[in-house]
Image: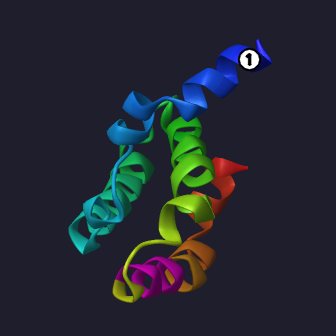
Amino acid sequence: MSTLCELIERSYTIQYQKASKQHINMDVLNSLISLITFFVKIESKNSPLLLKQLFVHIFFNPAIWIYCSIDVQMRLYTYLATEFVTCSEIYHLIQ
């Protein structure tokens, strides 16, 4: 299994298919933040799970954000430091 994983990781095709840092811009970040608001408002039974996945795999993943522009990083960390921390609905839904 590890050999298969190594082959996939080293594959030129896989490397070529990865998104570049230019794909994650302010519009993408604002859309992701809007998606959070949508999941909080719809109050479906799957909202907490979807929110948790969104935060764990995207918002809290530094490998995604480290190569973005400074403006995008500032917007992300400002959002996490202010709106995310102060919005108890989000915090309780993703626990």
Q: Quadrant of residue 80?
A: bottom right
Relative to 4, residue 18 above or below: below
The picture places residue 25, in percent across and down from the top left corner, at 27, 70
The picture places residue 11, in percent across and down from the top left corner, at 49, 29
The picture places residue 49, in percent across and down from the top left corner, at 58, 35
Q: Is residue 63 left or right of residue 26?
A: right
Q: Is residue 21 left or right of residue 55?
A: left
Q: Amino acid at mark 1?
A: Thr
Relative to 89, residue 5 above or below: above
Residue neighbourhood size for the residue with mark 1, other residues' Cα within 10 Å, grouped as few (<14), some (14–19), many (≥20)? few
Relative to 86, residue 6 above or below: above
Q: Residue at x 62, y 77 (%)?
A: 85
Q: Residue at x 40, y 73 (%)?
A: 68
Q: What colour scheme has been applied to the protein in the rendered image?
A: rainbow
Secondary element at tag 1: helix
Q: Quadrant of residue 88?
A: bottom right
Q: Residue at x 51, y 38 (%)?
A: 50
Q: Which residues are magenta?
A: 72-79
Name the chief secondary structure element in magenta.
Answer: helix
